[in-house]
Amino acid sequence: MEEMEDEEKQASQEKKHTSWVKKVMAYVAIGEAVVIFVGIQFIPWGRATINLPVKAEPKWDSPKTRELFFRACGDCHSNQTALPWYDLIAPITWIINRDIEKGRVALNVSEWGLQENEAGEAAETVRNGSMPPTLYALSHPSARLSASDKEAFVQGLVATFGEHKGEQTSKKKPDDSLHFFPVRKDDQNAGK
């Protein structure tokens, strides 16, 4: 009987010790996460290149097209970027700055005529819904266009930039999307 009581006491002590160790480890993990989060706030990236001077703009077909462009596309496709409050928080700021840099490489209306751009594809990307991106439209309600605004915007983009038709004749850019499960040739042949 005494042996059972001793075993129960020992099991209870081990349980208390294990519970205490788990709590300490949880506090250590939370502390490390806080230190890392605070530490990454001091990594500067991209803030100096957000609002650059406007060097040249295209000849817009109408003020309405320009207004719709800056409402739906201007934050990423011009040098006139209005940053949200949460842009000050890393790593969100890194993601936003990366998106702005990629957008400006594709099309930057604030440096019109100074670099190659994909302006001819602008109308098609708005028409098919790939621009503005869903996440951007969710976090920027003003970027959501009504059906009539979208149609007027597409027509204005075609009138301003022209329309991309047919096969792309320029060099295709490498796909930088994520592929979690790429298919290898070995895997395709194994199923035969």
Image: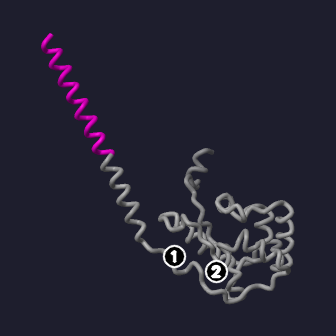
Q: Secondary structure at mark 2?
A: loop
Relative to 99, residue 49 above or below: below
Q: Position of residue 126 (x, y in %)?
A: 77, 66
**Residue at left offset 83%, top offset 73%:** 165
Which mark, by number, is residue 19? none
Task: Kindly give the residue lying farthest to the front in the view shown.
Answer: 85
**Residue at left offset 20%, top offset 20%:** 8
Q: Position of residue 61 (x, y in %)?
A: 85, 81
Report how far apart the C-alphas of labels 2 and 1 lie in the structure.
13 Å
**Is 64 positioned to the left or the right of 57 in the image?**
right
Tell me where the magenta segment starts and ends, as one range. 1-26
**Is 21 positioned to the left or the right of 184 in the image?**
left
Q: Position of residue 169 (x, y in %)?
A: 75, 77
**Residue at left offset 50%, top offset 68%:** 88
Q: Earlier in the sequence, mark 2 or mark 1?
A: 1
Which mark, by number, is residue 46? 1
- Amino acid on which the number 2 mark rests in the picture: Asn
Instruction: Give the number of marks.
Output: 2
Q: Is residue 19 magenta?
A: yes
Which mark, by number, is residue 79? 2
Q: Is residue 141 magenta?
A: no
